[in-house]
Amino acid sequence: MDSIDKDKVFISINVVCFLLSLLGIVFSIMWIKLGKASKAWYEVYESAIGAIEKHKDFASEKAIEVGAFCYNRLDGYKEIKISNSVFSGKAGEFSPSKINIGIGQVFLVTWLIIGFVHSLIAGYSFHELYPDTFGDTLISVFGFVILFLTTLIMGSPMIFKSGTIDWFRTYRKPD
């Protein structure tokens, strides 16, 4: 295999890696939105349960007295052991939803970096094959634009938006 063929194969491999980074970006954004949706629904239900527990038509006097997830005030409630050290096996004061959002964000940044790097490598490799053209710049800029647009479109609040959550947020009891 001569040098030009090897360069073309190398460019092709970088294009495939770039395309895989786009897929990683899409899945990372979906992961972030999944974590945010989970957190939103959890907070909707937590707020609803708290309101029900405090409402005299739905709860007993004792439930109203305790209310809003304050069960640690009840007789017989056993205190749990908390340790926020990542080296401890005990429970910690962490939000599973925020952790999921963080995982998505870390992978989003990682996939963006991978996409930028492979876009630059493909452009540089193209320059090695055809030094008298502007193809290297066009490939790199085109890669950056595709990464940006993919992130912008998939990150749009309208993609995968829940109409039900919006309804819960804006619904007010009729007067």
Image (spheres, helix red, strand yellow):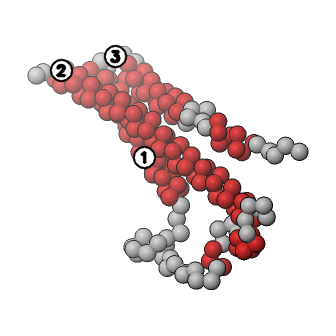
Task: Report the residue that reaches farthest toward the bottom.
Answer: 75
Q: Which mark is residue 132?
A: 3
Q: Which quadrant of the rendered structure holds the N terminus?
A: top left
At label 1, the amino acid type is Phe
Label 1 crowd (10 A; few <14 / some 14-19 / many >=20): some
- Give the spatial CA distance, label 3 vs label 1: 37 Å
Q: Quadrant of residue 161?
A: top right
Q: Earlier in the sequence, mark 1 or mark 2?
A: 2
Q: Is the residue 172 above or below the residue 2 in the image?
A: below
Query: Which residue in the structure is indicated by mark 1?
Result: 107
Label 3 crowd (10 A; few <14 / some 14-19 / many >=20): few
- Give the spatial CA distance, label 1 vs label 2: 33 Å
**Nearer the camera: disc 3 or disc 2:** 2
Instruction: Please report the residue visible at 46 percent of the width from the left and 47 percent of the height from the top.
Output: 104
Instruction: Please report the residue visible at 21 percent of the width from the left and 25 percent of the height from the top.
Output: 9
Q: Horizontal placement of 3 versus 113: left or right?
A: left
- In front of the other: 127 or 65: 65
**Nearer the camera: disc 1 or disc 2:** 1
Q: Earlier in the sequence, mark 3 or mark 2?
A: 2
Q: Are marks 3 and 1 in contact (CB under 8 Å)?
A: no
Q: Position of residue 53 (x, y in %)?
A: 71, 64
Query: Which residue in the structure is indicated by mark 2?
Result: 5
Q: Secondary structure at mark 1?
A: helix
Q: Secondary structure at mark 2?
A: helix
Task: Report the residue that reaches farthest toward the right.
Answer: 175
Count of numbered circles on the image = 3
Q: Position of residue 87 (x, y in %)?
A: 39, 73
At label 3, the amino acid type is Asp
